[in-house]
Amino acid sequence: MKKTLISVLIFTILLAISWAIVSGFIWLICLCFGFKFNFLIGTGIWLILVLINLVFKRTE
């Protein structure tokens, strides 16, 4: 039980770091081009990237 909880915690932390990196890059791109940044858009793009990654990992 303890190993499962630690694994879930590590997985959640890794997802949070992934989200922060993607949202940070999108924020920088918006800053460079003068676009308005919204965390909902950043989260949506991150979710799309995660789903694309899942699809292509399963087909290999």
Image: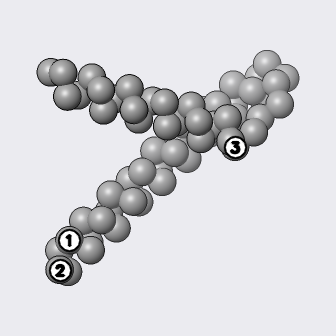
Alpha carbon distance from label 1 to label 3: 30 Å
Q: In the figure, 38 relative to 7: above or below? A: above
- Which residue has dot 3 on it? 39
Q: Position of residue 28 (x, y in %)?
A: 69, 31
Q: Quadrant of the N terminus?
A: bottom left
Circles 1, 2 touching at the beta carbon (< 8 Å) = yes
Alpha carbon distance from label 1 to label 2: 5 Å
Residue 9 as seen in the image, left or right of residue 36: left
Q: Earlier in the sequence, mark 3 or mark 2?
A: 2
Residue 1 as seen in the image, left or right of residue 30: left
The amino acid pointed to by label 2 is Met
Q: Secondary structure at mark 3?
A: helix
The amino acid pointed to by label 3 is Phe
Q: Residues within 10 Å of mark 3 (few under 14, many from 20)?
A: few
- Which residue has dot 2 on it? 1
Q: In the figure, 7 relative to 45: above or below? A: below
Query: What residue is shown at x 23% (from left), y 28% (from top)?
Result: 57
Q: Secondary structure at mark 1?
A: helix
Query: What residue is shown at x 59% (from left), y 36% (from top)?
Result: 44
Q: Position of residue 24 (x, y in %)?
A: 62, 39
- Which residue has dot 1 on it? 4
Residue 21 as seen in the image, left or right of residue 42: left
Q: Earlier in the sequence, mark 1 or mark 3?
A: 1
Q: Nearer the viewer, residue 30 or 55?
A: 55
Q: Residues within 10 Å of mark 1 (few under 14, many from 20)?
A: few
The count of marks equals 3
The amino acid pointed to by label 1 is Thr
Q: Secondary structure at mark 2?
A: loop
Colour mapping used in the image? one colour
Query: What residue is shown at x 42% (from left), y 51% (from top)?
Result: 15
Residue lying farthest to the bottom in this orientation: 2
Q: Quadrant of the C terminus?
A: top left
